[in-house]
Amino acid sequence: MAFSVIVALAAFAFVTTVTPGPNNLMLLASGANFGFKKTLPHMVGIVVGLSALTLVVGGGLMALFEAYPILNTWLSILSAAYLLWLAWKIATAAPLKESDGKGKPMTLLQAAAFQWVNPKAWAMGLSAITLYAPHKTLVSVLIVASVFAVVSFPAISVWAWLGIVVRQWLNSHTRYRVFNITMALLLIASLYPVLNL
């Protein structure tokens, strides 16, 4: 793969991972609710899950979805249902003082597994393989997954950091509730462009 193609791929990976979507909205909420350090496993899980998804898509899963379009429909339904459930959990989360530490950030494994029902992750993986590894050779697929792994962590870290900035503003019960409900509504809204609801 030419250096210029890798640079273009890195730009694509940065833009697609830094822009708002389910992962970043959840990182913003997690940073605000739990802080940066406790959100680190969530961030690493996103990187691991997205890279694994890209490898599997490049390894042949894309052909399966092309052969059986009904799989796209089922994935969309499953993704929407899971994101709606996550939005409900965020909207109804109690402030940290009230929850007595019961609330927990997403773990590495949970965040990695979430990528398999995250419509934006599928769109990024499918697009990256189609655009930057059209012949789907092992080397090109590995390069695409590796670039996503390297570029996505700093891009998504911005959202967890923004959550910490927002946390300082969340010094009242009302503001906390408004923030969590807003994050939940934005998470639901993030379904629109990806699923064409």
Image (cartoon, rainbow, N blue to C red):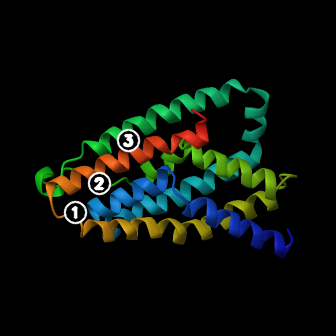
The reply, left or right, for residue 71 in relation to residue 133 is left
Q: At 79% from the left edge and 37% from the top edge, which residue is drawn?
A: 63
Asked whether the beta carbons under mark 2 and mark 1 sit within 8 Å of each other, the answer is yes
Q: Which residue is mark 3?
A: 86
Dot placed on the residue nearer the N-terminal end, 3 or 2: 3
- Nearer to us: label 1 or label 3: 1
Query: In the rendered structure, which amino acid carries the disc numbered 2?
Result: Phe
Residue 100 drawn at (x, y percent)? 12, 53
Residue 95 drawn at (x, y percent)? 18, 53
* 190 over 141 or under it: above or below: above
> Which residue occupies the extreme top position in the image?
70
Pick the front one: 144 or 19: 19
Query: In the rendered structure, which amino acid carries the disc numbered 3?
Result: Leu
Q: Quadrant of residue 37?
A: bottom left
Label 3 secondary element: helix
Q: Quadrant of the C terminus?
A: top right
Residue 182 drawn at (x, y percent)? 34, 49
Which numbered marker is on residue 170?
1
What's the CA distance linking mark 3 and mark 2?
15 Å
Query: In the rendered structure, which amino acid carries the disc numbered 1?
Result: Leu
Q: At 54% from the left edge and 68% from the top edge, which residue is drawn?
A: 155
